[in-house]
Amino acid sequence: MEKIINNKVYNTETAQLIKEYWNGHEKGDDYYQLERLYMTENGEMFLYYIGGKYTKYEGQEGIIPLEPCNACKWLEKIELTEAIERHFAYVLGEELTGAIYISAQSLD
């Protein structure tokens, strides 16, 4: 999918996929939800989403540009601390990134 938002091109075919979340429902199901976090060659982050009519996306598909802190929050929400460390240590600082990792590990 390609979309131009605020004069920037976001393309799932050319951007790097960082992580995805799928809720386990089959495509076509009213509860199906898929989210994929991407990074462009310029370091821009965006979330591609698609969801059935009974999800927060209400049967829509689209792209949402994300600031690095919001991308990190998305990763934290789905408990992908490894990806936080890999892609956001430069934003958060290594000390804070480690704290997020330790916090998530103690939840297991």
Image (cartoon, grey):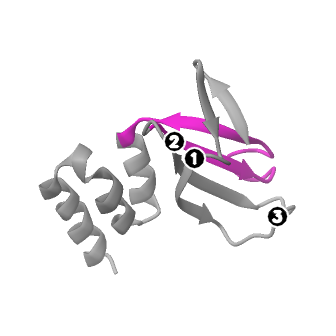
Residue at image location 45% in from the left, 51% down from the top: 74
Q: Secondary structure at mark 3?
A: loop
On whether residue 67 falls in the magenta region, the answer is: yes
Q: Residues within 10 Å of mark 1 (few under 14, many from 20)?
A: some
Element at label 1:
loop
The verdict on residue 99 being magenta is no
The answer to whether the residues at label 1 and label 2 have Cβ atoms under 8 Å apart is yes
Residue holding disc 1: 15
Q: Which residue is mark 3?
A: 27
Give the magenta-colored segment's residue range.
44-68
18 vs 75, nearest the viewer:
18
Dot 2 corresponds to which residue?
Answer: 40
Rendered view: 93 above or below 24: above
Q: Quadrant of residue 29?
A: bottom right
Q: Residue at 42% across / 39% down in the picture?
A: 43
Q: CA distance from mark 1 to mark 2?
A: 5 Å
Location of residue 7 in the rendering, given as x and y in whole percent from the top left corner? 59, 18
